[in-house]
Image (cartoon, rainbow, N blue to C red):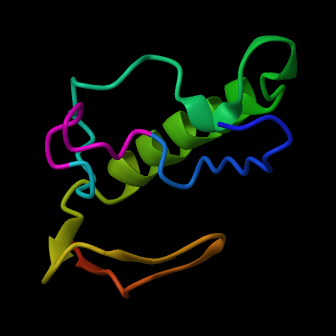
């Protein structure tokens, strides 16, 4: 890059390179081809302090959901993420469960 060039970085595409990650646009909770520390939380001295809290909340929330609704299942297609450059939206995701 020439000196003085403006450089804009975005974490929106973090870890979505198909050369490095298999089927990068698909959510897979059992994915094994990702680093332990997701780059969306930053790095070094600027690493997000809320990362540990976010992970703990997600783990506890999913455990409570699985305990409360053990037969929860996806109905239809999984959600899809659309958009780019900070303007993102997701498709509806329908779930159901038996009592």
Q: Is residue 26 above or below residue 31?
A: below
The residue at 74%/47% (across/down) is 7
Q: Quadrant of the N terminus?
A: top right
* Residue 98 in sight from this viewpoint: no
Q: Quadrant of residue 51?
A: top right
Viewer-nearest residue: 25 or 76:
25
53 sits to left or right of 63: right
2 sits to left or right of 36: right
Report if residue 87 lies within the magenta region. Answer: no
Viewer-nearest residue: 64 or 30:
30
The residue at 37%/87% (across/down) is 92
The residue at 68%/33% (across/down) is 41
Q: Is residue 61 above or below residue 90?
A: above
Report if residue 21 lies within the magenta region. Answer: yes
Query: Magenta part of the protein: which range?
Result: 15-23
Q: Quadrant of residue 94?
A: bottom left
Image coordinates for residue 70, horizontal then vertical, percent: 24, 54
Residue at the limit of the structure toward the front, as seen here: 2
Residue at the limit of the structure toward the top, as seen here: 44
Residue at the limit of the structure toward the bottom, as seen here: 92
* Residue 38 in sight from this viewpoint: yes
82 sits to left or right of 17: right
The residue at 64%/51% (across/down) is 10
* Magenta part, dominant SS: loop
Q: Quadrant of the C terminus?
A: bottom left
Image coordinates for residue 4, horizontal then vertical, percent: 86, 41
Q: Is residue 25 above or below residue 85?
A: above
* Number of numbered discs overlaid on the protein picture: 0
């Amino acid at each position: 890059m020439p000196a003085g060039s403006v450089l804009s970085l975005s974490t929106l595409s973090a870890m979505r390179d198909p050369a490095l990650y298999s089927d990068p646009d698909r959510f897979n909770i059992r994915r094994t081809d990702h680093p332990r520390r997701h780059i969306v939380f930053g790095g070094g001295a600027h690493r997000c302090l809320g990362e540990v809290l976010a992970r703990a909340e997600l783990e506890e929330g999913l455990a409570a959901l699985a305990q409360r609704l053990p037969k929860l299942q996806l109905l239809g297609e999984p959600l899809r993420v659309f958009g780019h450059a900070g303007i993102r939206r997701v498709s509806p995701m329908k779930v159901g469960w038996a009592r």
